Image (tube, grey):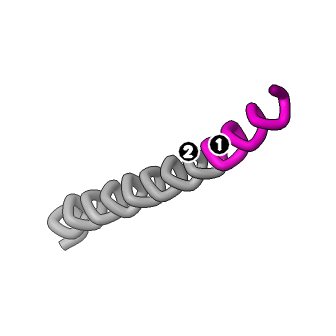
Amino acid sequence: MAATMTLVYVPLRIYLTATDRSRRLKLLQRIRRLREELGQPLQS
């Protein structure tokens, strides 16, 4: 029972952390792009 639980849980955990990390990176890139777009008119 415990072995099957780990076999199911471990890949699921890896998948969730991987998707969460990529989602966070996309959010950071979007925020950075927005900040650059907002920062350009202020600087000029």
Q: Is residue 21 above or below residue 6?
A: below
The secondary element bearing badge 1 is classed as helix
Instruction: Locate residue 37: give its quadrant.
Output: bottom left
Q: Is residue 28 above or below residue 44?
A: above
Q: Residue at x 57, y 51 (%)?
A: 15
Image disc number at residue 13: 1
- In the image, is residue 28 above or below residue 40? above
Instruction: Name the foreground residue: 12 vs 38.
Output: 12
Local crowd at mark 1 within 10 Å, few (<14), some, or many (≥20)?
few
Quarter residue 33 falls in? bottom left
Q: Is residue 15 left or right of residue 7?
A: left
Question: Could you tell me how many numbered marks the image carries?
Answer: 2
Name the amino acid type tagged 2. Leu
Real-space CA distance between mark 1 and mark 2, rounded to the nearest whole angstrom: 5 Å
Q: Quadrant of the C terminus?
A: bottom left
Residue at x 60%, y 47% (from the top left corner): 17
Three-letter amino acid code at the position of disc 1? Arg
Q: Are marks 1 and 2 in contact (CB under 8 Å)?
A: yes
Q: Give the residue drawn at x 47%, y 51%.
A: 24
Magenta region: which residues? Answer: 1-13
Residue 6 part of the magenta segment:
yes
Where is residue 2 shown, x and y percent of the image?
Answer: 84, 28
Q: Which residue is at a point 31% across and 59% down the rendered structure image?
A: 30
Residue 4 in magenta stretch: yes
Horizontal side of 33 relative to 23 (left or right) equals left
Q: Nearer the viewer, residue 12 or 24?
A: 12
Q: Which residue is mark 2?
A: 16
* Image side of residue 9 versus residue 43, left or right: right
